Each structure stands twice: as structure tokens, then as C-alpha cells.
Image (cartoon, helix red, strand yellow):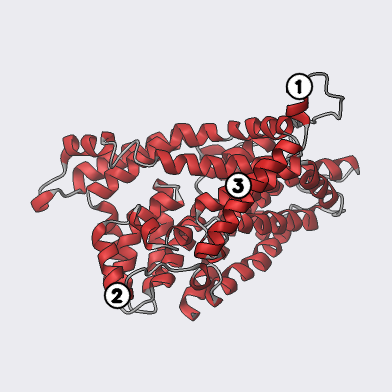
Amino acid sequence: MIARLGRILSAVFARTAPDPFVLAVLLTLVAFGAAAIWGRGPGETAFGLARTMDAWRDPSTGLWRFLAFAMQMCLILVTGHALAESRPVRAAIRAFASLPKRPAPAAAMVGLVAMAFGLINWGLGLIVGALLARDVARALEARGVRVHAPLLAAAGYTGMLVWHGGFSGSAPLTMVADIEAARVLPPDTIRLLTDELGEGWGIDLSRTLLSPMNLFVTGGLLILVPALLWLLTPGKAEPVTPMPAEEELFEDPPLPARSVPDFLERTPLIPVILAGLILWALWRFHADFSVLRMGLNEINMLMLAAGLLAHGSVRSYVASAERGAKGCAGIILQFPLYAGIMGVLAVSGLIAAFAGAMAANASEQTLPVYTMLSAGVVNLFVPSGGGQWGIQGPVALEAGLALGIAPEKMIMAVAYGDQLTNMLQPFWALPLLAITGLKARDIVGYTAVIMVAAGAWMALGLLLF
């Protein structure tokens, strides 16, 4: 029954889902219309099209607001991709790919590995999941076993269902220090948190990512999602879609160096020196702030060092990073559009009104769940954990403090909603789709089923803790 539901939804989305860039344009038009009609300016005056356009084009609120953050996201993707393509990680992926002998356990294993790596770094989980899905399909097809590529690709995408509960989660990492939080949250919210929690109130990772609630929610998803992928696998008599032909990866052959530049590109000395400097800098950071205060910049530094050491040469690392940068094309093209949507909805007051309406009749027990649901809706329009936190974080924190809910719980409520509807929003699937050769419409039917089950589990965690 579950497998049939997945096939039906997959077929529906295959006929109706637009290209991600088209979706971004359509959502921009929806945001324009909603802001112009229902938005409110100073004195509760109608927002109108002129103000909507001003909010959209304004560099401080609209299209170009998160250029720095977009670079951080590209670096997470590129460094994760480069590490995933290194010989040690690729060897591990191929070893895992050879393990399953049947389609159902193969889908479950791909999902589990993708989520495990996604908890380390969302870019790494996304690329490892894509490469593993492709290699598993190849290994099973070589044995004469029929595999359904869309389900395997959907399994490889499930790292984006848990990433915000791991060590590259934007909202938890942003809140580890009040100085970092002040770059995203407005002054009024910072003052409120300072009054409530005292000076230097940074919320370290032991209260968010390593909290009992997150361990329950994220740990449960590591069991629930693979089991569901197993059940979604088509039967022997059902039609399947094979994995498209793959592109060969770059391999740096161990040839003798014929010149000084050739030697410098191939020697492991330069990667070791740079990685050593980075690790020393991270150690200094740990000495000053502790590892529980690591933010996006520190995570990117760690991924860069690990990738350099794993590749062992500048030539190999740069070639892999260049391939990873192709996956940034969607981010580069679409991020300004989503930043513009965010600016329009934020300045017009629609996001605050939407989140506030969700919380208006909430209690201490139900507010985190309502916040998660509203964050899931907002993520469809603003598929950026950091960008969304900048918009919805102040509303969630202030509403939570008013009801006596700890800030860390509201942080994770927004984080869970943000990652939940990644299973419907194809924005972050672009690199995976490029690697597997599939379309967003091919996988979203299966990810939609996973989203419903995962949402119920997240809501249970927010109610229990």
C-alpha cells in the first residue's frame, strides 16, 4: 500500500511539478500579489505595488541581502562535494554500494548513510547521498537486479531532512553567540534576549543540537526514514526507472612531476601546510570559545581542511571543487529571487502576521508545534535556513518567551519546520539531481510521503519535551 502511494504521488508530481527556477519565479509573483493586497505599511496603510517593488529591490531587505550567506552556503556545498569525491570517501561509498543485494535494503541503506553524513554537514550529506544512490544503482544493475532510480535518489536526498539537527544547522549555529545572532536578528529581539538571559547569553550547542529533544527527534528519524524507504520500494512486477548514465569523475594520476608548477600542484605538502594552519586556527577558536560554539565559518574551515587532506594534492582538490561549484548554479541564480521573496514578505509584515496567527491561540505545549508548521510553509517560499531564521526567528523567540518557553526549543521548532519541507521544495536538490541525472519531479512523490511521516515524529518530539 505504501509503495503504491509513493508511485501514485511520484506520477502526479512528474506531470505537474515545474522546474525549480520556474517555481522561484512563480513564488515571486505570489509574494508580490500577497504583499500588494494584504501587506501593511506604517500606520497600517495598504502596502501596494510600489512599496512591494521597493522592498524587493532594496539591497538591505531584498534581492541582495544575503550575498554573504549565499557564499557560505556555496562553500558548504563545494567543500562537502570535494570531500565526498576524495579517494578515501569514494572508496567508502563504493564499499557501501556493494553491500545491498536487493532494492529494498539498498534504499534503506542509502537513506541512512545520507542522513548520517547530513548530520555532519548538509553539503557532504547531499553529495554522499547522491553518489551513493548512483553507485548502488550501478552495482545492483551489474548483478541483474532491477532498481528504481527515483526512489534511490529520494533516499539520497533525505540528509536534507535532518541537517538542521546536525552540525551545519544554520539557526542553532547562528545562536551560539550573541554577537553572531545580532547579525541576523533585529535589535529589539536581541535586547529582549539580553534582558531575559543576561549579557553574553549565547545558546551553546548542548542546549540545541545535543539536547535530549533533538537526540530523540533526530535519532528517531534515523530509524523511521530507512524503514519507510524499505516499504516504498516497488515490487518485482512493478515498472521501474533505471539510473541515467553517469559522468566519469576526475582522477589525478600519480604521474611524475615534470616542472616546478606541476610538482606544486601534485605534492601533498601544500594541502598539509594549509590544512595544518586551518586546524591550528580552529584549535585557537576552541581554546577561546569551545567546540560547542562553532558556527558556519568554522564548519567550512573544518570541511576545507578535511578535503585538502583527503585529496592529497591541490590539483585533485581544485578539480573536485570546480565540479562542486556547478551545483552552486542554482543557488547563485535562485538565491536572489528567494531573498527578494523574503524581503517582500518580511517588510510587508506578512510573515510576522502568518506566524503570529499560528501562535495566537497556542499554549505552552502547542506553540512549538504551530511554529514548526508555520516554518514549514515559510520554507517553501524562503528555502534558506539562515534566511528563514532571520525572518521567523524574532517572532518565534518573542512568542516563546511570552509563554515561558526556552529559546532553544523555539530555535529547534523553526529548524525542524525548515528542514521538513525540503522534501517538497526542490531548491536544495539541484546538486543531487545533477549527479543522478534525474528531475525534481521524479523524486518528490517519494519525499512527500517521507515528509508526512517525519513531520508527525517531529511534532511528537516537540510535545514530549
In the picture as drawn, the residue positioned furthest to the top comes out as 259
SS for tag 1?
A: helix
In the picture as drawn, the residue positioned furthest to the right comes out as 143
Q: Earlier in the sequence, mark 1 or mark 2?
A: 2
Amino acid marked by disc 3: Gly
283 or 446: nearer the eye? 283
Q: Earlier in the sequence, mark 3 or mark 2?
A: 3
Name the residue carrying label 3.
123
**Would residue 78 be found to the left or right of residue 381 on screen?**
right
Residue at left offset 63%, top offset 44% = 304
Q: Measure how far apart labels 1 and 2 are at the Cα level.
A: 60 Å
Q: Which percent across, then down, holds residue 420?
A: 51, 58
SS for tag 3?
A: helix
Residue at left offset 32%, top offset 70% = 199
Position of residue 414 relative to residue 365, above or below, is above
Q: Measure how far apart labels 3 and 1 are at the Cα level.
A: 34 Å
Amino acid marked by disc 2: Glu
Amino acid marked by disc 1: Val
Q: Where, quadrant-wise, is the N terminus in this rendering?
A: bottom right
Residue 78 visible in the displayed image: yes
Mark identifier at residue 128? none
- Disc 2: CA contacts within 10 A as few (<14), some (14-19) or many (>=20): few
Q: Which percent across, then down, holds residue 313?
A: 75, 35
Residue at left offset 59%, top offset 72% = 215
Name the residue carrying label 1.
260
**Would residue 421 be found to the left or right of residue 340 on screen?**
right
Q: Measure how far apart labels 3 and 2 are at the Cα level.
A: 35 Å
Name the residue carrying label 2.
196
Residue 157 visible in the displayed image: no
Q: How many marks?
A: 3
